[in-house]
Amino acid sequence: MASVSEILETMDYGPAPEASGEVMKWLSARGAFGHFIGGRFTEPGPTFDVMNPATGELLAKVTQGTGSDVQAAVKAARAALPRWSKLSGHDRARYLYALARHIQKRERFLAVLETIDNGKPIRESRDIDVPLAARHFYHHAGWAEMLADEFPSQGPVGVCGQIIPWNFPLLMLAWKVAPALAAGNTVVLKPAEYTPLTALAFAEICAEVGLPKGVVNIVTGDGATGAALVEADVDKIAFTGSTEVGRAIRKVTAGSGKKLTLELGGKSPFIVFADADIDAAVEGVVDAIWFNQGQVCCAGSRILVQERVARDFAERLARRMARLRVGDPLDKSTDMGAIVDPVQLRRIRDLVAQGEAEGAVLHQAPCQLPATGNYFAPGFFTEVAPANIVSEVEIFGPVATLTTFRTPDEAVALANNTRYGLAASVWSENVNLALDVAAQVKAGVVWVNATNIFDAGAGFGGYRESGFGREGGREGMEEYLAEPPVPAKAEPVPIAPETAPTPEAPAAADAIDRTAKLYIGGAQKRPDSGYSYAVRGKAGVIGLAGLGSRKDIRNAVEAAHKASGWGRATGHNRAQVLYYLAENLVSREAEFANRLKSAGSPKPAEEVATAIRRAFWYAAQADKYDGAVHATKSAHVTLAMPEPFGVMGIACPTSAPLLGLLSLVLPAIAMGNRVVALPSQNMPLSATDLYQVFDTSDLPGGVVNIVTGARDELARTLAAHDDIAAMWYCGSTEGARMVETESAGNLKATWTVRNRDWLGAEGQGRSFLKHATQIKNIWVPYGE
Ligand code: NAI
C-alpha cells in the first residue's frame, strides 16, 4: 500500500480557476480608457490594445498619451500641489489610510485584474502583489502622520513624474505613489504599456476616496509617453525599468536640477554554501527565479553553489523544477504563469538560444505548455562559461545559471563580478559566514537564508548599474523630501573667476622643486604632463601648481582602489586618524592662515579655525553615523547599514579653498570612502599644503588623492571613470550638467553640492554623511 507521502507526491491537482467575471464586466463596461487627469478620466484618444498574455485575447483599449496629455497632467499636478503640500500630515495620512483600505476591499478584484493583464499566477497577485500594495499605503500613512516630527525642516520635492514597469504593476505604483503623497508631493504616473489596467483601477479608487483633484494623475502610453514625462516640467523623476532606459533618463535630466531615483536591472547572485539547508535553498531557487516567471529585477538569476554539494544540489533542483505547474495563471494551483508579452517571450527565447549556442547546457522542466499564450518552461543552465551571454545579461525570464565555487572568497569574487548590484541571497547555517559574505557582496539588498522578501518598512534599491536611491521605509521617504534649503548667504561667497590654467614649461630644476606637486597614493608626484601652472594671489604669482591630466586621474583612481583597507577599518580607527589630522592642523594654524591670506581669502583665520572644528566633528561622527534595524516581517531583523561607496570623485568649491575642500573630503573619508579630490583651480595651494598634514596624521596612502589643474576638465574624466562609484561636484550649472551626463556610463551616484557659506552651519552636517554612503539592507532570519 502506498504511504500518505507517496500519495501526496503522485496526486495531481484538478483545475481551480479563480472567477474573472466581475473583472471582465468592469472592462467591458469601460470600453476604452482615457487618462486620469485632474480627478477625472479624459475622453479616450488614439488607443493601443492591452492583451491577456495567457490567452492572447484583447482586454482593453487604452489611450496612447501624447506630449500634450503629459503636459495637461503635469499642469493638474502643479495646480494641486500648494493645497496638498500644505495639508497637515495627519490630513494627508487619512487619505492614504483610505486608499489602503479601498485596495484591501478590492483585493480579489485587483488580484484577478493583475493576473489577466500581466500573466502572473493568481496565488502571487492575491498573496503578494495586492496585500503588499495595501501595506505600502498603510505604512506611508504612518510617515505622513509623523512627518513634522521625523523630518523637521524638510518639505516635498514638488511634482513627481513616475514611470513604472510591467512586472509588478500595482505594487510598483504603490511603491512610488504612497511615499510621494505622504511627503506632500503630487504625481503624474505612467504605467507600462503592457500592464496599465490596475493603475486605471487605482485611479477610480482615488476618485472614490475623494482624493483632491490633481494629486494623482495617470497617463498611459509607451516609451514615448515616458520620455515626454521625463522632459516635462516636473521636479523629480522616479523610474523603475531597464538599465538602458535608466541611463537615457540620467542623460536627459542631467543639469536640469530634477531629483532622480533609478531602480534598474540586476543579475543577482544566489550563493549556496555546503553547510546550507540544501532543501531550503532549492525551495529558495523556486522563489528566486521562477517567481513571477523570472521577470523580477532582483531575481536570483546566478546560482553559485559550493563545489562539493553542487551535483547533489543540481539534481534536487531538477527534480523540484519538474514538479512546477506551468499554465493558466488564474488557476490557484499554478506555480508559473505566462510571460507578459510576445516581445518579452522572444527576448527570452533568443537569449536562451544564444546561451546554448555559446556552450551552456540547458536543463528545462519537461512540462506540457498550453497551446496558446506566452509560455516558457522553467529552466537553468550548467557549464556556463564566464563570457557566455547568459552569465552577464539579464534574461528577465525563468532561467538561471548554475556555477560552482570553492571558497568563500571565490564566492564573493564571483558574486561581485557583474555591472549590477541590486540584490543577493546567501545560504549557510553558519551565521558568521553568512553575515561576512553579506557584508562583502556589493548589493543594496541581501537576504540570508531567504530570497525575494519585501516590506514597506525596509529600503530597496541598488548599487552600481542597478541604479541609485531607495524605495521603502525611512530611506525611501527621504527620496521624496527636498533637502533643507541652504539659507540665503549673509554675504556673497567669493568665487574667484576660473581662468584657464596656462601651462608653464618645466624650466630650471629649482623652479620645479618649488612647484606644488600632485598627491597620489600618499606620495607627492610630478604631473604626467611635466607642466605646471601659475597660481596668482593678491600680489601676483604666489606659486606654481602641477597641471594634472587624464593620466594623473587614472593613477589617482588606481591608488585609491589599492587603499581599500580604509573601508574595512572600524569607525573608531578612522576617528583616531581624523582626530590626529585635526591636531596637526591646529599646530599649523598660523601657517595655513598666512597661505590663505596671500591667496586673497577674505577671512583666512576664520576659515582655518572652522576647518579644524570640522575635522574634530567628522572624527566624532566616524563611529556614530550608523544604521537602523527595521521592523519588517516576523522572524526577521532587517539591518539597514550605511556603507561607503568605495572610491569617490570630489570637485571642490572654488571659494574657501581650504575649508571647501575639507568640508567635502572629511565626511567622505569619515565614512570609509577613498577620494580623488580636485581642489579650487585658482587657489590650490592651501590644498597642496595639506599633503604634509596627511603624511603626519597616519592617513594611509591612497585614502586622499589630490590632483590640481583645470578642475572641470579633470572632473569630466572622473565623472566618466568606471571605477569611481560616486561623484560630488560643486561648481557651475554647466559643470553639473557635464558631470551628470558623463556619470551615465556606470550610473554612478552624483551629488551637485550647492555652493554655500562654508563658514556657516550649512557647511557641515549629517546630510554630507548621508550622501557619502549607500544603504544595504540585510535580512537576517531567526527562529526555526
Ligand atoms: P523598459 O525599461 O523599456 O520599460 C519600463 C518603463 O519605462 C515602461 O513604462 C516604458 O514605457 C518606459 N519607457 C520606455 N522607454 C522610455 C524612455 N525613453 N523614457 C521614459 N520612459 C520609458 O523595459 P522593457 O522594454 O519593457 O523591458 C526590457 C527589459 O528591461 C526587460 O527584458 C528587462 O531586462 C528589463 N526590465 C527591468 C525591470 C526592472 O524592474 N528592473 C522592469 C522591466 C523591464
Image (cartoon, rainbow, N blue to C red):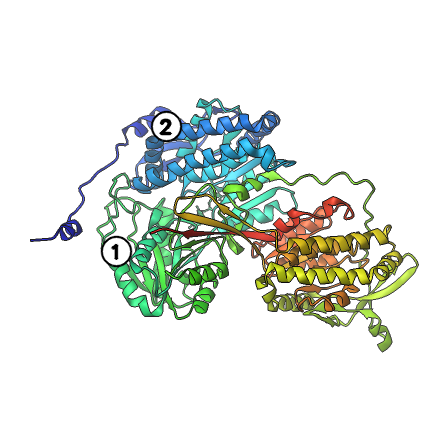
The quadrant where residue 148 appears: top right
At 59% across and 66% down in the image, what residue appears? 565
* Left-right relation of 37 to 620: left
Does residue 687 appear in the picture of this structure?
A: no
Q: Report x, y in % for residue 237.
A: 56, 41
User: In this figure, which residue is indicated by the disc labeled 2?
Assistant: 105
Amino acid under disc 1: Arg
Q: Secondary structure at mark 2?
A: helix
- The single residue placed furthest to the left in the displayed view is 1
Q: Report x, y in % for residue 738.
A: 67, 52
At 66% across and 46% down in the image, what residue appears? 255
- The single residue placed furthest to the right in the displayed view is 539
Marks 1/2 in contact by CB < 8 Å: the verdict is no
Q: Secondary structure at mark 1?
A: helix
Q: CA distance from mark 1 to mark 2?
A: 36 Å
Question: What numbered label is drawn on residue 320?
Answer: 1
How many circles with numbers are drawn on the protein?
2
Does residue 238 appear in the picture of this structure?
A: yes
Q: Relative to the observer, which residue lies in front, 571 or 307?
A: 571
At 72% across and 41% down in the image, what residue appears? 486
* Left-right relation of 75 to 507: left
- Would you call the spot at circle 2 few (<14 residues within 10 Å), some (14-19), or many (20 or more)? few
Amino acid under disc 2: Lys
At 81% across and 49% down in the image, what residue appears? 495
- The single residue placed furthest to the bottom in the displayed view is 509
Q: Report x, y in % for residue 613.
A: 75, 53
